[in-house]
Image (cartoon, rainbow, N blue to C red):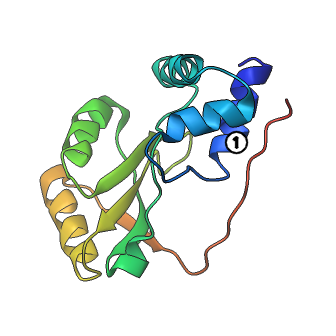
Amino acid sequence: MDTTDKIIVNRLQQGFPICASPYQRVAEELGIAEAELLTRLQALLADGVLSRFGPMYHAEQMGGALTLAALKVPEERFDEVTDIVNSFPEVAHNYARNHLLNMWFVLATEKPEQVQSVIAEIERQTGLVVYNMPKISEYYVGLQLEA
């Protein structure tokens, strides 16, 4: 990431304008062309520097639920279990971890009561215990890159 990339990431974490040409507005604020902004965002995504670019929804405020879950997956089954877990539309993120519980994922459901049924189905399909770690408190940690 160069300085301009860092400035873009910092700016976009502050919010995205709701208007007819939001990318153009952000580009103007940053003093770059809209095409450059779009090219840089596409490169950051393609290179894996950003895993996603899009809105963050508060599922609970919309009547749904979120939970962090983890699995202890035998190494030889990791790819198989990843495919199973990722097949659920409720799985928002899924990451390998260097930990006894080596697969961590977030479930986002439309209704709170769906969390347990999705967990039960993942357990049924994988034959593994899902460790459910629901949110107790929420904290916002803002990341600002030194540009």
Residue at image location 26% in from the left, 58% down from the top: 90
Residue 8 vertical position relative to residue 34 in the rendered view, above or below: below
* Residue 139 horizontal side relative to residue 74, left or right: right
Q: Horizontally, is 141 left or right of 24 in the view?
A: right
Up-down relation of residue 19 to residue 109 (above or below)? above
Number of numbered callouts drawn? 1
Outermost residue, front direction? 20
Query: For the point 74% across and 22% down, which residue is it?
Result: 4
Q: For residue 33, what is the image quadrant?
A: top right
Residue occupied by mark 1: 11
Mark 1 falls on what kind of element? helix
Q: Which image quarter holds the N terminus?
A: top right
Q: Residue 32, how many percent across, how many down?
A: 68, 22
Instruction: Work out which quarter of the rendered image holds the C terminus and state it.
Output: top right
Q: Position of residue 126 (x, y in %)?
A: 19, 50
Residue sitting at x 47%, y 50%: 19
Q: Quadrant of residue 84?
A: top left
Q: Amino acid at mark 1?
A: Arg
Q: Is residue 142 left or right of residue 27?
A: right
x and y percentages locating residue 18 in the rendered image: 49, 54
**Number of other residues with Cα within 10 Å of mark 1, as a class: few under 14, some 14 to 19, many 20 or more:** some
- Residue 108 on image: x %, y %: 33, 64
Compared with 20, 36 (above or below) is above
Observer-nearest of 20 and 133:
20
The extreme right residue here reads: 146
